[in-house]
Amino acid sequence: MSGQERDVHTPEGVRLQKVLAGAGLGSRRACEELITAGRVSVDGVVVRELGVRVDPRTAVLHVDGRRIQLDASMVTLVLNKPAGVVSTMSDERGRPSLAQFVADRPERLFHVGRLDAETEGLLLLTNDGELANRLAHPSHGVPKTYLATVAGRVRPAVGVQLRAGIELEDGPVVVDSFRVVDHTASRTLVEVVLHEGRNRIVRRLMEAVGHPVERLVRTQIGPVRLGNLKPGRVRELTAKELGELMSEVGL
């Protein structure tokens, strides 16, 4: 065993392959193969030997560069928020809130970011404070994808304008990408990708270029996609989604 591997070995810990299997990476035998193939790192050190033990409470494990969540008490959910629901866990004005969708969950969950009441789609709920803080911090700039139905026929020049940057009342905004998905004579379906998290940013952007939003759905945050999840339904992130999301924000 090399000096590097001894650095991450915790004699009183749990065998690495057992920890990986417990985190849903496959059978112990499959996890042993991951280790011997050099695909597993512990605290930033690649481990190739099977005798290594780790403390699951403190070890930072990556497989193929993707973070593995070892704390089973941490939960991150995807909600497809319907229109008309406010992005709070309770509302003093009695409006429909997020709590109704997770009333059966034992965890104390909070939402990551928000969608305005009339915007639908992907909202993350978690009890992992560190993940939530990093996702919310502008420095990590996790991209968010929206599908917007807007008034009028959107010309190619609009995409050029949005990619070059639009000056709003609270500063400039540049989209990561913009494309027309479909159109009729009177309205257009567009996809907008941006890192920004400012209030009503997509609605304000499209208003600024002369195409007010009629319907707005967030379909993706980083590697997490809404997919075919029905409005009002909730699902847990897969281990792959969670690992990629954690890696994207430096965890």
Image (cartoon, rainbow, N blue to C red):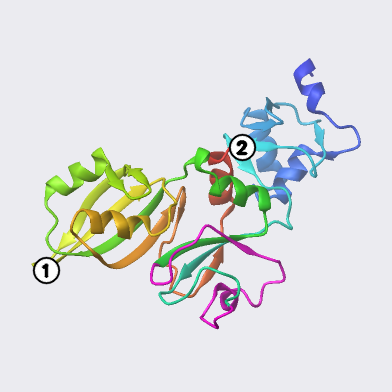
Question: Residue pushed farthest front?
Answer: 169
Disc 1 is placed on an element classified as: loop
User: What residue did someone put label 2 on?
Assistant: 63
* Residue 139 visible from this viewpoint: yes
**Is 110 positioned to the left or the right of 231 in the image?**
right
Question: Residue pushed farthest top?
Answer: 3
Q: Choose top left, top right, bottom left or bottom right for residue 1.
A: top right
**Is 157 positioned to the left or the right of 206 in the image?**
left
* Residue 2 visible from this viewpoint: no
Q: Which residues are magenta?
A: 92-119
Q: Earlier in the sequence, mark 1 or mark 2?
A: 2
Residue in the foreground of this view, choosing between 116 and 180? 116
Closest to the camera, between mark 1 and mark 2, is 1
Q: Is residue 124 magenta?
A: no
Alpha carbon distance from label 1 to label 2? 49 Å
Residue in the foreground of this view, choosing between 171 and 160? 171
Disc 2 is placed on an element classified as: strand
Q: Tag 2: Cα neighbours inside 10 Å, few (<14), some, or many (≥20)?
A: some
Q: Tag 1: Cα neighbours inside 10 Å, few (<14), some, or many (≥20)?
A: few
* Mark number displayed over residue 186: 1
